[in-house]
Image (spheres, coloured by chain):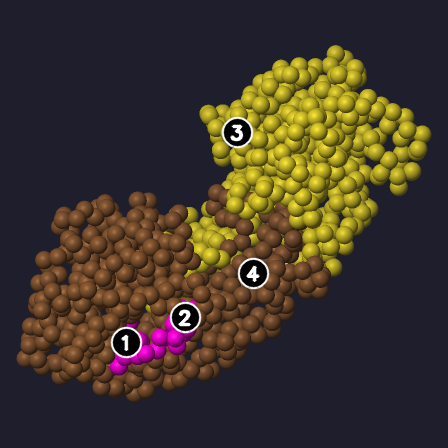
Chain colours: A yellow, B brown
Amino acid sequence: MKSFLFPVAVLFSLAGKAQPVAQFVRQNKAQLLDEYVRFLSIPNVSADTPNIRRNTAFIREMMERRGIRVQLLQGTTPGVTPAVFGEIKTPGAARTLGFYAHYDGQPVNPKQWHEGLAPFEPVVLTAPLESGGKIVGPYKAGEPVDDSYRISGRGSADDKAGVMVILNAYDALVKTGAKLSANIRFLFEGEEEVGSIHLDEIFRRHKDLLTADAWIVVDGPKHITGRKTLSFGVRGDVNMALTVYGARRPLHSGNYGNWAPNPALRLVQLLASLKDENGNVLVKDFYADVTPLSPREKQALAQLPNSDSLLKKELGLKDPEMPGRSLAEGLMVPTLNINGIQSANVGAQASNVIPAKAEAVLDLRLVKGNDWRRQVQKVVDHIKSRGFTVIDHEPTDEERAASAKLVKITMDHGYNAQRTSMDLPIARAVQEAVQSTTNDPLVLVPSAGGSLPLYLFEDVLQSKVMVLSIANYDNNQHAENENVRIGFLWEGIETVAAVMRMK
Amino acid sequence: MKSFLFPVAVLFSLAGKAQPVAQFVRQNKAQLLDEYVRFLSIPNVSADTPNIRRNTAFIREMMERRGIRVQLLQGTTPGVTPAVFGEIKTPGAARTLGFYAHYDGQPVNPKQWHEGLAPFEPVVLTAPLESGGKIVGPYKAGEPVDDSYRISGRGSADDKAGVMVILNAYDALVKTGAKLSANIRFLFEGEEEVGSIHLDEIFRRHKDLLTADAWIVVDGPKHITGRKTLSFGVRGDVNMALTVYGARRPLHSGNYGNWAPNPALRLVQLLASLKDENGNVLVKDFYADVTPLSPREKQALAQLPNSDSLLKKELGLKDPEMPGRSLAEGLMVPTLNINGIQSANVGAQASNVIPAKAEAVLDLRLVKGNDWRRQVQKVVDHIKSRGFTVIDHEPTDEERAASAKLVKITMDHGYNAQRTSMDLPIARAVQEAVQSTTNDPLVLVPSAGGSLPLYLFEDVLQSKVMVLSIANYDNNQHAENENVRIGFLWEGIETVAAVMRMK
């Protein structure tokens, strides 16, 4: 497949173009890492507005240092976190390319991070700690750091890495005197991890600024093989939070055990009814809306390198959730996942109580054909069919008296999946530009497993959109001990630079 | 029943005896409360050794102030929390009576306490906050406080209240010049909430000091009616902690959802298999060993006031766990309760992950006939029958590769249930002494729902044992916002004093 698509002669000539950028990166590693570590030191949990604004300001400075004039874009809702926008106009440009990343991160629970790691105190690791890596210590500018080493911190991979490689790719092109052929637009969002709740408004309000032939979203992990990874779609996503109620207050398990209902038991019975032991969701019509894959998408899926055995070993798993289904196949199907459960306490804080409530958060990933409101409704209907009374608030005395099985369900605003046709000329041009930076065949993914609000690029901006993933697959994205492989930042800069000047 | 057992004339004559003690209490409320608040201000979580020792020292001072010579009793294991012992020898005493309470408390999670309350900063409440009570503020010595008000704090009800009423009952008898007829022994344990793990050693080593005709354990809540409550047995107890494992690290729910098994799902499926929707434990032979109640025990059970409707209303519950079974009946049967569950996070800290592990703590209450090791083994066998590989440590790489369903199970040292025959003369004498302090019929419980290591009194000390409960039923024992009704402390002092000088 590789030699058929990219004859060796072409590869060499394309690789030649990347050389100045690669050289720029080699010569500026210390400076680039130093700035990146300062960026990661600013807390970026989406809901932490004061610190999020410090990130906004930091990105503005990064852009201005690189000669990019900055505009902060907001929608119509006042006071929300702005997206950071910039534009480079290229005289006689044949097309406009947009580059998107997000600078906010998932919530953190510092207690769950490894000893010596803190979400916003980046340190250098020799490898992920879960794989036997060691903590080297804080990055010291100028000290050489192996490309295989990691930088820890919330956002190090997801997705300050995107901001970092996009801005440095542009800078490298400018500093090495490369000639651009397209207008370049930059957009860095600060609310992605809370569901991009105002991106719609921003797109509608600033449509003129934001329209492009294609937007390249730099986010997500590469394939486990480390091969460069380009995705043409993403799953949609919506979260549901469930709270099941028992007695008004926690009860002594001896004095009330066998009489007062236990909400933790009720919750586990409910959750257990959602999915069978083989990973099939048991909610009625859960899989009914799925749009089948096109022949080209099926072909791409079949050609994906299967690293499931490697991955199972690395993750310490004997079997996948569904016997016989590969990871790649599973990502083309909607999910129902338990993100977290809590009722009273475990470990040293456990005590002999019947808890007063039990909570769970569910995550529904959606594929093309699903609608997030419809998918949520199917789950709500299932819960009702199990005898629960569904409310959206703490139960009143009357509700408690009327129903033995009360569940509060709240949800975020969700969004749907998106897929760009792999047959489009611009899709093929991006693919070729990325391929020009490597001798290894690309990993082409019809739809990534993760979620981004890509439907908005298509629906509101009428722009095509693709996802370029540069982070290591073992980055602990969304969890404790998040980290990025340093060498993949350098590679990412080269890759994005190649796309910025693609034919 | 009341007039049959206690003719009015007898009641009056007996009630007369209690008068000087009641008067002593009325005249010394401020001083008694002031000392109690200082006692509650010393943190008493069993595992917090430095603070537990401060409690030991405080009790020693309380006893010495009352003229009781103190011995700290330890078993054969060095360095563990001592029990505080004291003895009053009465010349010509016909019998020896022991009075037991415990001074350690259950773990606390200060974040779960109501705003304005902290586990070790006692304040006065007008009523439980869950029932619309208000915070009055810290107790100020000398200010009058209504008997219906509460003092908050870990241990306020369970079981520093026991220490408080025992020592003040003795003090009141001495100060009012009452003549004792029995030797009195005092024992205050500091490890009850961690399963009285060294009480066996202490009893065996100091058997001579501790033998008595009967031990009166002052612990637990009164019946919801507020009537004086005497129990002739307790359930046994053992805890099991379960941890189910997924991948070695938390995974992005988009990138791995539908492929990586979710340990939270595995755990809820396992827990749901333990009990049906009607509260029946589905573990094989779970109820097989239960010793049936004697005719007198059955009669006492039938005569217990049924306050289930009142309790349901107060707790905000529509139905009990098992349709048609009363609270009193449920307490005569072994339990399987979920004390707590946790996997990753919920609420603001939730993120879109497949958790790496999921944990639950179970609490098995045992009745006469059950053996705690046998009961645990039945649950372990059930878990194995569901395809789980049971380990007692973090899984090794080899164990992960060999089993798709790994569960770590650890457990405390448990203990069995105990029941004293209600037909014994000493059992009837205690009952009459308690009855002498009230015109309301007593609540006589063949076996309380809670657990205490009462079997040790019988097995090691060859002493009879009964439980006198003085705390309000709505004390939030073992949970956040624990509190004691102040008037029940005064009543408790009078009741214990009556038992100390019983015929």
Disc 1 element: strand
Q: Is residue A225 magenta?
A: no
Q: Give the range drawn in magenta.
A: B196-221
Q: Is residue B220 magenta?
A: yes
Of labels 1 and 2, the one closer to you? 2
Residue B227, horizontal then vertical, whole percent: 20, 69
Q: Mark 2 lies on which chain?
A: B
Q: Which chain carries label 1?
A: B
C-alpha span from label 4 to label 3: 36 Å
Of residues B129 and A339, which is closer to you in this image?
B129
Look at mark 3 in the image and give the residue it sits on: A52
Give the amino acid type for the residue marked by disc 4 in the picture.
Thr
Could you confirm whether marks 3 and 2 are on the same chain? Answer: no
Look at mark 1 in the image and give the residue it sits on: B215
Of labels 3 and 1, the one closer to you? 1
Q: Quadrant of residue A201?
A: top right
Of residues A354 and A190, which is closer to you in this image?
A354
Could you confirm whether marks 2 and 4 are on the same chain? Answer: yes
Disc 3 element: helix
Look at mark 4 in the image and give the residue it sits on: B243
Residue drawn at 58 percent across, 42 percent down: A116
B286 lies left or right of A181: left
